[in-house]
Image (cartoon, coloured by chain):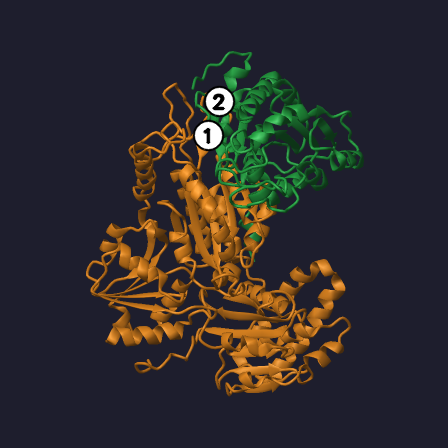
Chain colours: A green, B orange
Amino acid sequence: MSAELPCKLKASDYKSNTKPVWCPGCGDYHVLLSLTKAVAQIGLRPEEIAVISGIGCSSRIPAYLNCYGFHGVHGRALPLATGVKVARPDLTVICAGGDGDGFSIGGNHLLHACRRNIDITYVVMDNEVYGMTKGQPSPTTAPDWDSKIAPGGTGISPFYPLVIALASGANFVARAFSGDPNGTAKILVDAITHRGFSFVQILSPCVTFRPDQRGWKKQVHPAPVTPTSDASQAARRVMTDDGFNIGVLYKGSRKPYRQTVGTEIRFDRNLDEEFLV
Amino acid sequence: MQGSGVPDQAGSKDSISTALVGKGGSGVVTAGAMLLTAAARCGRYGMMIPAVGPQIRGGEAAALLRLGESPINCLDDRFDVLLGIDWQHAERFAPDIPLDAESLIITDPSGGAVPGLIIESGARVHELEMKALAETVSGGRPNMIALGFVARLAAIPQAAVRQAIAEKLAPKGRDAVIASNECVLLGYDQAGRAAPLDEAEAEAAADATGDASRCRWLISGNHAAGLGALRGGIRFAAAYPITPATEVLEWLAPRLSDAGGTLVQAEDELASINMAIGASYGGIPSLTATSGPGLSLMIEGLGLAVGAEIPLVVINVMRGGPSTGIPTKPEQSDFNAAVYGLHGDAPHIVVAANSVTDCVYTTQWAVHLAEATQAPAIVLSDQFIGQASTVVDPIPAIAFFAKRRLADNIDENFARYALTADGISPMPLPGTPGGQYTADGLEHSVNAKPSGLLEDHVTQLDKRARKIAGFDYGQHWADIDGDGELAVLTWGSTTSTVREGIGRLSTNLTANLKLISLRLLLPAQPRKMADALRGVERLMVIEQNHTGQLYRFLRAWYDLPAEVESMHRPGPSVFRPGEIAAALRDWCRQ
C-alpha cells in the first residue's frame, strides 16, 4: 500500500492487490470494476471511502479495494456502516453485500436503514442464491427453483427488494446489471452523490450455481422512465415491473439522518453539578 | 453478639429502613424519592430501591428506603416501617420487606386489609387515614400524607421535606407544592401522635432548617456508569432498550450530545453492538448497554471486536436469568456468559462494579482498558446497584481517559496487525492516507489479508492473547480490606453486603479476616491473587447465582487454599448483611 497516489486517480488505483475468491465469470467482478469507476469519476480519495460488508461471496469486496474496509459478521453490514457514518460523517460510506446477507439474515436492518435515511449507499449484488454455501435458495429465489435443501423448490414467493426499500423510506432506489459496467458505474455515481440512504440492487449472475442467469443479459432493458421524486409513482413502477428494468427509479428529497458525532469533543454541561443534592 | 448459627436479625442500629407500597400511580416512589432528597439535605446518607411487580409497568409498586448517618450501600436485614397506601398485591413484596415484632405497619383502613403474609410478622399495626386526610386538602394526595408521616418517624425536619417538594414539584406549579406541603404537615402531626419523639429529637426536628449545604450526590448505578463512560471519553452509544439497563442509555443520550457525541437507538441488540463497533472503527470511543438477553444477542459482535481488534465497551446490567428470567430483580448469573460466551479463543476483558459509586470508576476504567488494548471490555453491574438511588459523597474524577495507539506515520511497510512485543498494533483511522486496510472477522495475516494458514492463525491468536494477558492492570484488579488467615472473596454488588456483614462480627473474628472484592474478572490474575492469598488458610467465595459461577472459574484459574467454601444462591432477593454475618460466624469458628 503506498501513501503516495497521484492527484487524479484512475479506476485501477482503487483496487487492491488481493485476488478475489470469486469463480471465473462471476458478476461481482464487474461490480468491483463499476464501483472503482464510479469513485474515480466522483474524484474521492481511497482513504476517504469506507466500504462495509457482512458475509457472503459479494461481501468479500472491501478487501479487493484500496479503501478503508470492514468485513464484519453475517447480516450486520448496515448497522456497522451506520456506526461508521454517524461517527465519521466526513467519510463516504458504501455498504455492500448479497441477497442472503441483506434480505434474509439482515432483513430487519434493511427496513431500519431505509427508515433512518443515513447518508450511505447500499449496494446489493443479487444473484438469487447462497453461493458461498454452495447453492441454497435466498429470499429472492423463485419458488420452484430446485435445490438439495429444498427439493422441488421452496414454494415461497420471492421478496421484492425495491418495493421493500421504497416502502421503508429509502431516498434513492435503482436497479443495475453487472454485465453493463459503464451503466452500473453511472448509477453508482448518482447513488453515492445523492444525499440520504441510496439503495442499488445490482443483478449479478452466479454462473456456478445459477447458470440459467447467463440469460439475464438478454432479459435486462433500460427502464423506459426518468427518475421520479414522487414515491407513489415510483411504487407503481417497482410493483409492476418485470424485475429487469434497469435504471434509477426513485430519487427522493427526504432529509438524511442528522445525528452525527462532532469532530470537537467538549463538555458543555457540568456533569458533577447535576448530581448535587 | 449472637450465638453461632442464629441468623443475625438485629439489623443495624445506625440506620432506619422504611418501605412504602401502593398500586401503580399511588406515588410511593415519588414520595420515597422526596424522602431520600430531604435526608440528603440534612446531612444523612441513604438508598432507595424502587421495586415493581413482574409486569414492570402498572400494577403494584414499592419504594424500599434505608437512611443513616454513614454511607449506605446495601439493604438492612429488616424494615422498621412498612407503610401501605393500599395493599393490592403487596404480599408479592413480602420477601423483600422482612418485618419483625419491633416493626411498625402503617395502613389506611380504606385501602383494604393488610395481607396475612405481612401480618404474620407480628409487627405492630397503626392505622392512618391517608385518603381521608388528603381529601381535606384541595389537590391533596395520600402519598404526601405518607411522606410527612414517615419523614417524622425518620426524624427528617419538615423544612428539608418542604425543600424536596418544592424542587420536585416546581414544574407542576405553586398549587401542587402548597397542597403537598399541607399534606406533609398533616402526616407529620399524625406521626407525632402515633410515635412521639423524645424531647431532644423533637427540638432538633423543629429547629433544623434542612438547608444544609448541597454537599452530597444523589446517583444510581446506571447513571454512575453513564458518568464513568463520559468521563472516560465515550462519545458514541448505540442501544436497544432493556430492563434494567435503559437508564444508562436515557441518561447518556442528551449528555452525549452536549459532549459532542451521539446516541443512536438501534432496531435490536445485533444492530446496536455492530453500530458501536462501526463507530469505534471510525475512531470514536463507543459503547452499548444491555442486560442478559441482549448480551446473548451481542455475543457474535463481541467476537468480531476481538478478531478485528476494535475497542468497545458493553455494560451489562444483570437481572435474573436464563431467558427473560426476572427482568426487575438482580442476579450475578451472567458471569459465565460474559467470560465464556464467545466462540473460538477470544481474549477479552470483563470487569465488575462493586457498588453504586464504583460504577463510575469501573466503567471509566473499562473505557481505558478497551481503548488501550483494542479489545472489547464487558462491564458487569446488576439491577440492584443499577437502579438504586443512593446518597453518596461526591465521586472524585480519576485520570483514566481513552487513549488508543494510533498509526499516524505510515510507510510502505505498515501492517495493521503487526506482531508487536505487547501485542498492541498501531491502528490507522479511516481518512489516514496510506493506512487503508480491511478490518475483518476472518482470520488474517499481519497485513489484514484473509488467511487460513496455521502460522497466521497462531501468531494472531498469540498476539491477541498477549495484549490482554500482558496488560498492566495495576492495583485496580481487586479491592482488598483487612488481613488474616481467613479470606472472603466476592464480586459485584454483593461486596457491600459482605462488607457490612463482616462489620457485624466481633473484632476477634474480623481481626483475622480478609475481604477480596474482584473487579477484574477476566483475564485472571494468578500472580496477584497468589500475593493476596499468601498466608490465607481458608477461603469463602460468596456470589448471587445458582451454580457458583465465579467459584468454578477460580478453581480453574487460581491456586487456592486447601479449604475453599462456596456460598451462593440465586436471586431475586439480594443477600442481607445479617445472613452473611451468620454464615461467616459459623464458618470462622469451624
Q: In which quarter of the image is residue B487?
A: bottom left
Q: Quadrant of the N terminus of chain B?
A: bottom left
- Is A189 on the left or on the right of B273, as rendered? right
The x, y position of residue B562, in whole percent, is 20, 65
Q: Residue at x 37, y 54 (%)?
A: B519
Q: Residue B43, position in %: x, y?
A: 51, 64
Q: In what element is the residue under mark 1?
A: strand
Is any part of residue A204 visible from this angle?
A: no
What residue did someone put label 2 on? A66
When the figure is inspected, residue A261 is found, relative to residue B548, above or below; the finding is above
SS under mark 2: loop
Residue B96 appears in the picture as rendered:
yes
Q: Mark 2 lies on which chain?
A: A
Q: Residue B311 carries which label?
A: none
**Mark 2 Cα-neighbour bin, 10 Å: few <14, some 14–19, many ≥20:** many
Nearer to me, A68 or A123: A123
B259 to the left or right of B467 = right
- Amino acid type at circle 1 is Thr
- The numbered mark at residue B438 is 1
The percent coordinates of residue B428 (x first, y second) are: 44, 28
